[in-house]
Image: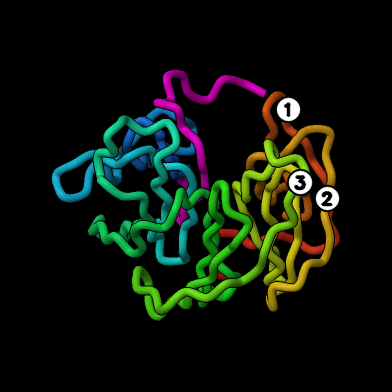
Amino acid sequence: FYLFRENSNHANGLAVNPKGEIVACEMDGRIVTISPNGKSLLALANQFGDKRFNAPNDLTVDHEGGVYFTDPDLRAPKPLPQGATAVYYISPDLRITRLIEMLPNPKGICLSPDQSTLYVVLSGNPQVFAYPVLSPGKLGSRRPFCTLEQSRDKRMQRGGNGAAVDVKGNLYVATPLGVQVFDPRGDRLGNIVFPEPPSNLTFGGADFKTLYVTALHSLYTAAMEVPGRQSMSPN
């Protein structure tokens, strides 16, 4: 490995857009794109309503290059710059829309393979919500999608964190108990356990059948039978 970027402004969620650029949530208040070689950076969004974002946490990119991202209060200045925790959309022409507000600490976010559903995972809450995508950047009414299994230890009952989907539409959510997996109906398929509690995850590798999982001190991999959804291509 090598050092890709210094002084990342507490970058958190990452994705690759259709141009092959890296899109990053900077928890210091903005969304940026970074060239594949790491030498150039462009700020996509750093404020809404003339106020900085709270602390952008995670994101997902649609096939048009639009970016959905979560903005909880974790690591944010107090009082909250935005006055609310929310989910936003940045269109390819850089228009910013607040799609969901007053959802308690949204963290993980991802799209279904056919782009018809947006999943939002909450911090400190076991409920995962699904929103129909009516058109890019426009959502319908939410519905409960699944409930994450929680630890019996109340100190570890933290809801979920990062999320990803595979090409069959199965949802993978990083939780203190491991990576919990649900089918497209919201039925629990199982739990992939790691030596440390996972924080985020993504698919990669030559065939996108490798699940990469971040934790507090380590990066883990797990070989999967089904490849993950790719954001850089509509296929």
Sequence-wise, the earlier of marks 2 and 1 is 2
Residue name at image x 68 percent, y 36 percent: 155
What kind of secondary structure does the magenta stretch mostly adopt?
A: loop
Badge 1 crowding class, 10 Å Cα cut-off, few under 14, some 14 to 19, many 20 or more, is: few
> Would residue 89 be found to the left or right of residue 221 on screen?
left
Q: Are marks 1 and 3 in contact (CB under 8 Å)?
A: no
Under tag 3, what secondary structure? loop
Name the disc covering residue 151, or none: 3
> Image height check: is 39 above or below 100?
above
Q: Considering the image in quadrants, where does the C terminus appear?
A: bottom right
**Distance in Å between CA atoms under marks 2 and 3:** 15 Å
Name the residue tied to disc 2: 192
Residue name at image x 46 percent, y 19 percent: 6
Residue 5 sits inside the magenta stretch = yes
Magenta span of residues: 1-21
Name the residue tied to disc 1: 218
Image-quadrant location for residue 128: bottom right
Under tag 2, what secondary structure? strand
Q: Position of residue 146 (x, y in %)?
A: 66, 68
Sequence-wise, the earlier of marks 1 and 3 is 3
Q: Considering the image in quadrants, where does the N terminus appear?
A: top right
The disc labelled 3 sits on which kind of residue?
A: Ser
Residue name at image x 29 percent, y 45 percent: 44
The disc labelled 2 sits on which kind of residue?
A: Ile
Residue 129 sits inside the magenta stretch = no
Badge 3 crowding class, 10 Å Cα cut-off, few under 14, some 14 to 19, many 20 or more, is: some
Q: Position of residue 93 (x, y in %)?
A: 25, 59
Q: Position of residue 17 (x, y in %)?
A: 47, 53
Nearer the observer: mark 2 or 1; the answer is 2
